[in-house]
Image (cartoon, grey):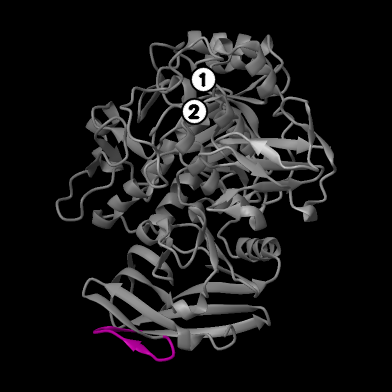
């Protein structure tokens, strides 16, 4: 079936005139365009599928791609995407929420070689993968204009070792990226203000947290100290607000005095509509194509209406590069870049900007990199992954973590969907390692913002839903963060934590240098067992206490040690795991 692929594929092309579908074995024709699929085999286990669209004149595209027949995905096929691992034949989240901008999908086929389907190079439009009723769709999404024959390619490779497939794919992909810069792949460690303080961070709080690090077992274990949202006057007015000293260099020097490297959060795409920049420099922003006035959007913004800088304009690039050069010169060496989200990039569809969304997002990151140089760390927190390759050193691999069990489960699934990126494209960032709850912190309100309690969390309704997490649930999260092997940024208020909690956090360091992805032991996108060198993660994600027997093929000795408690654990008998719990066994 792998060699005779074309009969199982359907081409689809959507333009302003509507959508046209047709068998991939034939030329597909529209009113003023034609599309053709060619399939090449550079290797026995690899096929390159190229879709070429030839317009008669200028053609505006909305979506294009291929449909894969359900016959290609037998019962038992599992799919690995941004949402984690899921049954390809079940009603899965990818059916209602497609994966946009994620390079590739892995397909674990029962009793057969595994498949990897991914984009073959950088494209101005973001890739989109969706799955409904067992039918996989792969293509590109968004407004794009072509006036000559243009091609888009996928690489479909197969093999028995999925990890090897991702390695080979990553190697081939980076060769075809524009101005590819080899990212730093060291594991980042530090503290960040967001998860506890939200936007309420102040210099007074910074000083307390710095002293807490110095006086705790964490001293000497962290590298970066990052001010997240809340230090700035307003988005687009990137000066320290009244809770901080007036000069950024003063803030950076106080952090450096404690032996830590200063980091800074920014959202450089958006500008508040009541800032001086918005009032007096309208030429710098995206404008509506029909009216010529600046686009105003509040999509995804916590602060209301925002204008959007147009990074296709040299004067905007010059302004933003200057901002980041100032931050760098003030002493900051880590930059967490946020809010280059799809919700905002969709504004390009109604703008006068000539760039498609992926190209535009890449221009934002390129402009920032020009200001901070190659030695500073750039963390991508929300920009399309395809736009960040070669520019970002680290990438968030999940939505925000909060002190709720639903967030723990959701973030774990998402991290597995992107774990293959780790130390191939960048260092994966699981958000924050957090441990605070009402019994181990001086603060009895562990959440960083007011919220309205909702019903028990589900897979699709998890945001601050259900009761707040207890100690077992947060220890499960810490086990996941450690086993992932990615960056570790602490997010609690450290001076409010009890000594025992600080001792627990200190055990996260030094981080693991590498991680094994437990594909075989994932159920519902969550690991029951997570093997690694001389260690094993063991988890109970269910709502009931569960007895687990460790599989013999994992070759775990009869006597092990609990990584967190130091207690001896016998594994030659079933283990009784409490509700919502997980730990790491070592030997």
Report, in whole angstroms, how far the alpha carbon at label 2 lies from the one at label 1.
Answer: 7 Å
Q: Residue furthest bottom?
A: 26
Residue 137 is drawn in which quadrant?
bottom left
Mark 2 vs 1: CB contact within 8 A: yes
The answer to whether residue 347 is magenta is no
Q: Which mark is residue 469?
A: 2
Q: Residue 78, image x and y in percent? A: 54, 64
Q: Which residues are magenta?
A: 24-34
- Seen from the viewer's position, the closer of residues 475 and 261 is 475
Badge 1 marks a residue whose secondary structure is loop
Badge 2 marks a residue whose secondary structure is loop
| 204 displayed left or right of 339 | right
- Seen from the viewer's position, the closer of residues 234 and 210 is 210
Q: Residue 401, image x and y in percent? A: 49, 34
| 401 displayed left or right of 276 | right
| 78 displayed left or right of 424 | left
Q: Say which residue label 1 marks.
A: 437
Residue at point 52%, 53% (across, down):
524
Q: Which mark is residue 64?
A: none
What is the chief secondary structure element of the magenta stretch?
loop
The answer to whether residue 31 is magenta is yes
Residue 160 is drawn in which quadrant?
bottom right
Q: Quadrant of the C terminus?
A: top right
Residue 332 is drawn in which quadrant?
top right
Q: Is residue 400 visible?
A: no
Q: Residue 253, image x and y in percent? A: 60, 15
Residue at point 33%, 47% (across, down):
343
- In primary-sequence order, the first of circles 2 and 1 is 1
- Seen from the viewer's position, the closer of residues 107 and 23 is 107
328 to 534, vertically: above or below: above
5 to 437, vertically: above or below: below
């Amino acid at each position: 079936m792998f060699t005779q692929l074309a009969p199982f594929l359907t081409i689809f092309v959507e333009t302003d005139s509507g959508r046209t579908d047709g068998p991939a074995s034939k030329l597909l024709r529209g009113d003023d365009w034609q599309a053709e699929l060619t399939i090449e085999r550079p290797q026995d286990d690899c096929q390159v599928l190229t879709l070429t669209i030839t317009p008669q004149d200028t053609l505006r595209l909305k979506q294009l791609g291929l449909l894969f027949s359900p016959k290609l995905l037998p019962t038992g096929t599992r799919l690995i995407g941004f949402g984690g691992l899921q049954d390809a034949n079940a009603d899965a989240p990818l059916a209602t929420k497609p994966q946009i901008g994620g390079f590739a999908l892995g397909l674990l086929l029962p009793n057969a070689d595994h498949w990897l389907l991914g984009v073959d190079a950088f494209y101005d439009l973001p890739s989109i993968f969706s799955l409904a009723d067992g039918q996989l769709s792969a293509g590109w999404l968004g407004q794009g204009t072509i006036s000559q024959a243009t091609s888009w390619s996928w690489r479909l490779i197969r093999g028995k070792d999925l990890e090897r497939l991702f390695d080979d794919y990553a190697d081939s992909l980076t060769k075809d990226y524009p101005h590819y810069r080899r990212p730093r792949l060291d594991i980042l460690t530090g503290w960040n203000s967001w998860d506890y303080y939200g936007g309420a961070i102040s210099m007074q709080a910074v000083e307390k947290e710095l002293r807490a690090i110095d006086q705790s077992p964490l001293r000497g274990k962290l590298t970066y100290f990052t001010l997240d949202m809340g230090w700035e006057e307003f988005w687009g007015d990137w000066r320290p607000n009244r809770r901080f000293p007036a000069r950024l260099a003063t803030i950076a020097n106080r952090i450096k005095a404690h032996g830590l490297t200063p980091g800074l959060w920014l959202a450089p795409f958006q500008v508040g509509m009541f800032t001086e920049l918005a009032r007096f420099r309208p030429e710098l922003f995206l404008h509506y194509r029909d009216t010529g006035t600046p686009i105003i959007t509040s999509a995804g913004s916590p602060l209301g209406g925002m204008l959007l800088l147009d990074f296709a304009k040299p004067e905007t690039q010059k302004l933003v590069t200057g901002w980041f050069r100032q931050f760098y010169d003030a002493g900051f060496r880590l930059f967490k870049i946020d809010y280059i989200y799809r919700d905002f990039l969709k504004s390009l569809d109604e703008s006068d900007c000539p760039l498609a969304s992926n190209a535009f997002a890449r221009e934002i990151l390129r402009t920032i990199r020009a200001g901070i140089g190659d030695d500073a760390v750039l963390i991508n927190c929300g920009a399309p992954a395809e736009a960040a390759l070669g520019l970002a050193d680290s990438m968030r691999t999940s939505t925000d973590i909060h002190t709720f069990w639903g967030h723990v489960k959701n973030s774990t699934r998402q991290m597995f969907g992107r774990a293959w990126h780790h130390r191939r494209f960048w260092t994966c960032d699981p958000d924050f390692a957090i441990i605070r709850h009402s019994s181990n912190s001086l603060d009895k309100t562990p959440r960083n913002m007011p919220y309205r309690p909702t019903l028990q969390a589900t897979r699709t309704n998890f945001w601050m839903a259900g009761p707040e997490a207890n100690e077992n649930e947060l220890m499960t999260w810490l086990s996941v963060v450690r086993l992932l092997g990615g960056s570790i940024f602490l997010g609690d208020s450290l001076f409010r934590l009890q000594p025992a909690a600080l001792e627990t956090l200190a055990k996260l360091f030094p981080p693991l240098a590498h991680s094994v992805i437990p594909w075989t032991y994932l159920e519902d996108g969550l690991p029951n067992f997570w093997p690694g060198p001389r260690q094993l993660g063991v988890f109970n994600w269910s709502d009931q206490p569960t007895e687990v027997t460790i599989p013999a093929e994992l070759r775990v000795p009869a006597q092990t040690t609990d990584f967190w408690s130091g207690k001896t654990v016998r594994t030659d008998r079933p283990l009784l795991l409490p509700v919502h719990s997980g730990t790491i066994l070592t030997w």
